[in-house]
Amino acid sequence: MKKSLIFHLSIWWQYGIAVFFSLFFGFPLFWMVFSSFKSSRELVGNMWALPADPTLDAYRSVLAIPEFKFYYLNSLIITIGSVALLTIVATMAAYVFARIPFRGRNVLLFVFLAGMMIPLHVTLIPLYTMLRQMGLLNNLISLLFPYVGFGLPMSIYILRGFFEKIPVELEEAARLDGASTARIFWSVILPLSRPAVITVMILNVIGAWNEYLLALTLISGNNQAYTLPLGVYSIVTSMTTFQYDKAMSALTLSALPILVFFFIMQQQIVKGLVARVLG
Amino acid sequence: MNTDLRMSKIVHFIRRTILTEATITGMLFLLPATIIFTIFVIWPVIQSARYSLYSWNGLGPPTQFIGLDNYTRLVADPLFWQALRNNGFVMIWSLATQIPLGLSLAILLTGQIKGSSFFRTLYLSPLVLSGVIVGLLWQWIYNPTFGLANELLRILGLEKYTSIWLGNGSIALACIMLVSTWRDLGFYIVIFAAGIQGIPQDIYEAATIDGANGWQLHRYITLPLLKTTMLTATVLSIIGSLLFFDLVWVMTQGGPYHSSELVTSYMFKMAFTLKRWGYATTLGFVLFGITFALAIVFILLTKSREELE
């Protein structure tokens, strides 16, 4: 038997509700995409109709904006850079928190995990001041360490939970064979933890790719350094209702990479969201 | 005897060196994370506490120490209280939608209907989008002249309900919250669905044999067993409401006339539009205090729950 009848609703009502919410969640995105293939005049004339005469004009003019590809590139660079560094640093730390006891370790762990509750807002002005002193303000690099720092609590939390479930016997066997701790971490723990490491990486990729507040604070003075969220904001807000079609195609183009990523990685993303909350 | 003693000494020595080696490696492994975290997360929080005691326009280092003046000013600032009230509205809206709707849809998707993975994909897809893209898209949907929202009302013959939406101070925040529900509900559906799937099937079967109907199954099995998940979801929802920022900043920047102002957007304006850095850090620090206090209440609640069980 499948889990229960929902309350007293017949199966048709259940499908009805499911479809209603599908329209609620799905239609705005669907509308954004098909509107981007209309001309501005057609769009304003009839919002609801599918494009009668699909055109790529809007895409051509958006892609002709020279900065647009730099926004992608900047987002790609900072996402890859911060997630790579974060993954290395977080797995190493999480392993120690799971396996190597020493005095004061739990206090340190508490400090890291408490970091999940620190609002980004409280750190903005100090970070701005610090990076200004370092001369990194309005430079893409300025985002690297804040992204890593704020990604650490959640990453350590998930990875540590996973490492603790790996049987200790495997490590002891390796240790009797004379392997060093670093060696055990590299050759025993990491290969076994691929799923958890990938889950954490995926969550952090989404986080870094979409990040807005730190980027707005630290790099908004330099158009060349804009990540995609800042870039698409500056492009779309400069458009009038006469450029409706172009606004929709700019939004579609910016949404596309992460949506494709989501459709491919959906299983892991769901696993990651659950792990983040329920451990 | 003598050899035994020597053996045990050797074993002890080896064990100690191994431990030391592990500890040293451990410390080295922790070093990069600790350094980055200290400099870029912990230190700014400490600095923030200090800055909040200064009157400071952001140029150069803070010099004009004013004690707790920023805090007394904050208590007397009507805009701060309005922002906090708006955060209260955000919180109530979030709790009233995310928990009941999230749970109901999770029950729906884990139930009898086919194609639930298709529905889940649809429900979850807005979640992975940047708040900027979501906010901009809905800004066009709410556009008074050429927006989908008014267009829908016209088609339905409800022309008199058309509105300027985000331009109308009495409903702007509610309009933003609808978008927030659109984006975030999928997250709550997913965590509730995971909780439901963790409940052993035989409990439901036994109850069904005993004659329980659908409503009773959920009232007496699903809800009690999901208590921890619900508590976690509640806290996430509350903290999320306090830190809510992206959508408001993109869609209204707190306007019109502060009607959708939140503590976060007010703080950001103070800092980077008005350059009142001392007061802005005070706002940030108070936000931090509220969030932290709520988080600690949550930890104590879950602790006492675990002790009860």
Image: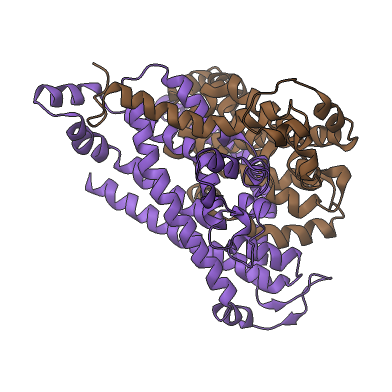
From the top left corner, tell me how far across and down residue A248 is, in percent. Answer: 72, 34
Q: Nearer the viewer, residue B145 or A13?
A: B145
Q: Picture coordinates of residue A124 (x, y %)?
A: 69, 58
Chain that the image shows in purple: B
Identified at 61% across, 65% down, the residue is B284
Task: State the brown chain.
Answer: A
**In the displayed structure image, the side of residue B222 where residue A85 appears, left or right:** right
Determine whether B2 is above or below B33 in the image. Answer: above
The image quadrant where one finds the N terminus of chain A is top left
Q: Position of residue B71 (x, y in %)?
A: 58, 78
Which is nearer the eye, A40 or B234? A40
Q: Measured along the vertical axis of the image, is residue B74 above or below residue B134?
A: below
Confirm whether residue B31 shows in the render.
Answer: no
Position of A153 with respect to A279 (left or right) is: right
Nearer to me, A136 or B251: B251
- Figure quadrant of residue A266: top right
